[in-house]
Amino acid sequence: MPLPFLTADRARDNDAAAGADPLGYEDPDRWRRPYRPGPWRVGGAAVLLLLASYVLFSAMIIAMAGSVSAAGVCVGFAALMIVTAVRLVRSGVVVSSQGLRRNGFLRSTTVRRQDIAAIRTVQQPVRWLGLPRTVQGQALLLQPVRGGAPETLITSHDADFLGQAESFERAADAIENWAASHS
């Protein structure tokens, strides 16, 4: 079974294709994540899916006991948990030849490559796992052509890179190389 979120790392592991493309794939028109989802993100989604399975099992028991409306509420709650887990794993930065897309939990923002002035890594206080607490870390910033405040794409302390400085550097380099090759 192919796992599409692993395709960006497959070329890095293959020595023959290491220097061909910054992201290591043949089709530049497809939206691809240049890094793997981190353990915090995958672990959180796994816990949500495990809880959803328990809620679905409870819905089956409740339906067999005769309360179909209560079972429907349980199924609805489990469906909400499954959708939340999928959105959690899909969150992140994806790139293609068209531009850069930042998939958030509730919405996505696309920036065309013509609208990107620079992408750079800086040392600054960053939010720890998206919570209000800030720590000193690194952030990958997108500076738009039209000016204004730079947007934070990824940080060294978000759910994909917490405790994995090398993974953050590889992802930041891949996105910066993408920006340089498509400017």
Image: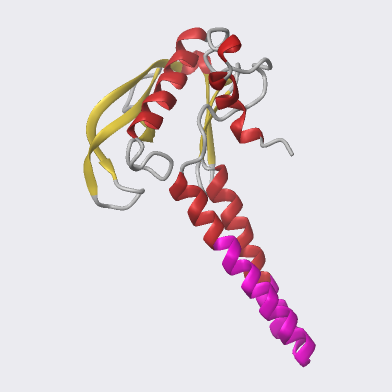
What percent of the width, then of the height, locates residue 4?
66, 34
In screen coordinates, is 123 left or right of 43?
left
Task: Name the residue located 62 percent from the left edge and 63 percent from the top edge.
Answer: 80
In screen coordinates, is 38 left or right of 32?
left
Task: Name the residue located 49 percent from the left edge and 56 percent from the top edge.
Answer: 44
What percent of the width, then of the height, locates residue 88?
53, 50
| Count of marks placed on residues | 0
Using the rendered view, name the quadrant where residue 85 is placed: bottom right
Q: Quadrant of the N terminus?
A: top right
* Above or below for 112 versus 151: above
Residue 125 seen in the current view:
yes
State yes or no: residue 67 in magenta: yes
Colouring mode (rainbow / by chain / secondary structure / one colour):
secondary structure
Magenta residues (range):
48-75
Task: Name the residue located 74 percent from the left edge and 80 percent from the top edge.
Answer: 60
Residue 183 seen in the current view:
no
Which is the main secondary structure of the residues drawn in magenta?
Answer: helix
In screen coordinates, is 84 left or right of 158?
right
Task: Name the residue located 31 percent from the left edge and 23 percent from the top edge.
Answer: 121
What percent of the width, then of the height, locates residue 144?
40, 21
State yes or no: residue 90 in magenta: no
In screen coordinates, is 78 left or right of 94?
right
* Above or below for 37 versus 151: below
What percent of the width, then of the height, locates residue 59?
70, 79
